């Protein structure tokens, strides 16, 4: 099954299009980002050779955020833990969706409302309003997410944009980026009418069904943060996501000597 979004060719190609120094290293079998004296490896697969990762640039500080916990191997390769692990929510699309009762009740409410739903690839010109709306909500709610340019440069044929409307006016939308047999929940927006009609429940369910039909086996819903984003965490867990702990953040000093 395909790994995390940050370890996909699309992600590296998109960053390169934006002028970021991103590359794939054959030796460590992973995708990297380099900023000045820092080499960063995000959501690294457990199979990534850690010593090879440190050897890419012997004069750079190497920071790694493993997709799974492998503390003993990291320490043996010269890494030291900088931050404790975050957790993500994932839905296995090879199995029937199994939302929790309260979430299922909200889905039923949305289905019996006047909402209409469409699902299609992202169209940058037509969907500019969506990015403007997300910019406004980030400012209002005081949070920051991955830059819009990632989604805007992503190959359109590997995106799913789902929108809910009332009387032809959008009240909620979600964007998913597809990478291999996995997809990542990227941006979501709704207004008061969308919230009142539980539009996001309907959109996520519709998106999961659409992605499954396109051969996607795993849906990554992103970070589960029960402290700073408790409502969003409940939404993801209620949808049936399994919570999985990542490997933390680790760093290694430059390897000046062999």
Image: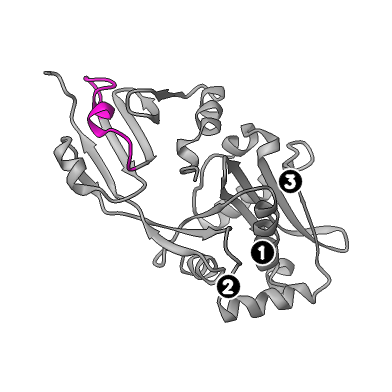
On screen, residue 221 versus residue 161, left or right, reads left
Looking at the image, which residue is at 46% across and 38% down?
Answer: 6
Q: Could you give the CA–CA distance between mark 1 and mark 2, rounded to whole angstroms?
A: 9 Å
> Of 19 and 209, which appears nearest the observer?
209
Mark 1 sits on what residue? 205
Residue 23: image quadrant is top left
- Find the magenta span and give its range: 46-61
Earlier in the chain: of badge 1 and badge 2, it is 2
Earlier in the chain: of badge 2 and badge 3, it is 2
Mark 3 sits on what residue? 129
Picture coordinates of residue 220 (x, y %)? 52, 53
SS of the residue under disc 3? helix
Dot 1, how many residues are within 10 Å of its Cα: few (below 14), some (14-19), or many (20+)? some
Picture coordinates of residue 236 (x, y %)? 53, 65
Q: Considering the whole magenta stretch, tell me its main secondary structure.
A: loop
> Of 158 and 37, which appears nearest the observer?
158
Colour basis: one colour
Earlier in the chain: of badge 3 and badge 1, it is 3
On screen, residue 18 versus residue 173, left or right, reads left
């Amino acid at each position: 099954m395909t790994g995390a979004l940050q370890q996909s060719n699309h992600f590296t190609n998109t960053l390169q299009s934006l002028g970021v120094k991103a590359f794939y290293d054959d030796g460590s079998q992973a995708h990297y980002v380099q900023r000045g004296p820092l080499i960063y490896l995000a959501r690294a697969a457990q199979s990534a050779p850690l010593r090879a990762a440190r050897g890419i640039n012997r004069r750079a500080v190497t920071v790694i955020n493993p997709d799974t916990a492998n503390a003993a191997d990291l320490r043996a390769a010269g890494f030291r833990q900088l931050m404790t692990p975050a957790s993500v929510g994932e839905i296995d699309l090879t199995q029937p969706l199994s939302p929790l009762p309260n979430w299922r009740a909200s889905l039923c409410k949305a289905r019996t409302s006047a909402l209409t739903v469409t699902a299609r690839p992202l169209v940058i010109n037509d969907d500019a309003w969506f990015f403007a709306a997300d910019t406004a909500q980030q400012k209002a709610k005081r949070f920051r997410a991955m830059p819009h340019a990632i989604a805007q440069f992503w190959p359109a044929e590997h995106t799913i944009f789902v929108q809910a409307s009332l009387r032809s006016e959008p009240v909620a939308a979600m964007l998913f980026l597809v990478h291999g047999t996995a997809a990542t929940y990227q941006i979501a927006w709704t207004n008061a009418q969308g919230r009142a009609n539980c539009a996001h429940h309907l959109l996520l369910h519709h998106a999961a069904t659409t992605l499954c039909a396109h051969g996607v086996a795993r849906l990554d819903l992103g970070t589960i943060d029960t402290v700073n984003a408790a409502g969003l965490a409940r939404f993801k867990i209620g949808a049936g996501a399994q919570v999985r702990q990542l490997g933390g953040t680790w760093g290694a000093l430059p390897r000046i000597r062999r």
